[in-house]
Image (cartoon, rainbow, N blue to C red):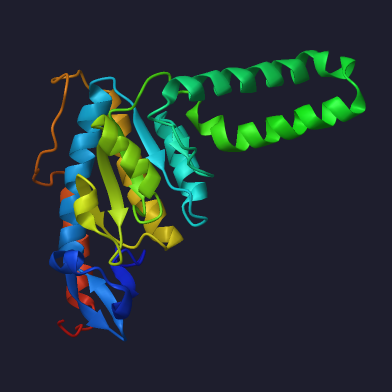
Amino acid sequence: MIEAGVHFGHRTSLWNPKMAPYIFGRKNQIHIMDIRETLRGLLRAKKYLSQVAAGGSLILFVGTKRQAGEALEEQSLRCGMPFVSERWLGGTLTNFRTIRSRLGRLEELENMRQTGAMDNYSKKMQSALNREHRKMYRNLNGLRTMNRLPECLFIVDPGKERNAIREAKRLGITTVALIDTDSDPTQVDLPIPGNDDGIRSIELIMKQLADAVIAGKGQSATESSPQPQQTKPTGTEAEMVAAATKAEEAQSPATEG
């Protein structure tokens, strides 16, 4: 985690005071997050997502910032869950029926391209249909497998994804988030304090969560509606804790504040 820069926060002048419990100190005017708190949040989130997946429910991964796109798409596809990596469309959750109808239109356009039916239209109409397809594909492709509302949202940078959080809250959908020192952790149900701007940091967290989802899918559901639970690290997770602790001890001291 230290090597991936998960512990680096924002400049101290940009911090949100509600993140104070998750901050270890500061160095060169940058807040340093407590890696132990990051591990606690990550292990708790992994346990919960594994339970959700074991119960057969969906988890929607959301991260529209440039740094998150590639890792979000790769890991969502790997664990077989829907994702939003380009733009959050208003009503993705609260107007889900309309989103499903737009996905139907996307499939219709793709069928026209594959069968050659689009060739029957004028060049001008073909150009318009191709533009429509590109736009819909960019915004909706990650939602193809979301045939029902998700039980949980995982969000990279809740400060940027306020609309997604607002819709989730309205519907009572649990939110898990990778959250930096400039955001409000009380806006999500399960915060994972960590660097939400660094590509390596996002990749590491996303891979861990995708692994948890895959593991959950291989288990029998034990609860129809899992609740977030505090867990103790075991196996690989214990190794992560030990490695992070060792790296933290080797880290040069930060100024408390």
Question: Can residue 157 be seen?
Answer: yes
Where residue 60 sits in the image (x, y, percent)? 37, 34
For the image, the number of numbered tags is 0
Q: Which quadrant is the N terminus positioned in?
A: bottom left
Q: Is residue 187 left or right of residue 65?
A: left
Give the residue drawn at x 50%, y 25%: 99
Quadrant housing residue 212: top left
Give the residue drawn at x 57%, y 37%: 139
Where residue 199 sits in the image (x, y, percent)? 45, 59
Q: Nearer the viewer, residue 66 or 38?
A: 66
Residue 200 versus residue 76 in the image, above or below:
below
Q: Which quadrant is the C terminus positioned in?
A: bottom left
Where residue 111 sits in the image (x, y, percent)? 70, 15
Where residue 138 sits in the image (x, y, percent)? 61, 38
Q: Nearer the viewer, residue 74 or 60?
A: 60
Residue 195 versus residue 157 in the image, above or below:
below
Give the residue drawn at x 50%, y 43%: 85
Q: Is residue 29 left or right of residue 189?
A: right
Quadrant housing residue 118: top right
Question: Can residue 146 be seen?
Answer: no
Quadrant housing residue 170: top left
Give the residue drawn at x 14%, y 37%: 228
Q: Nearer the viewer, residue 189 or 235?
A: 189
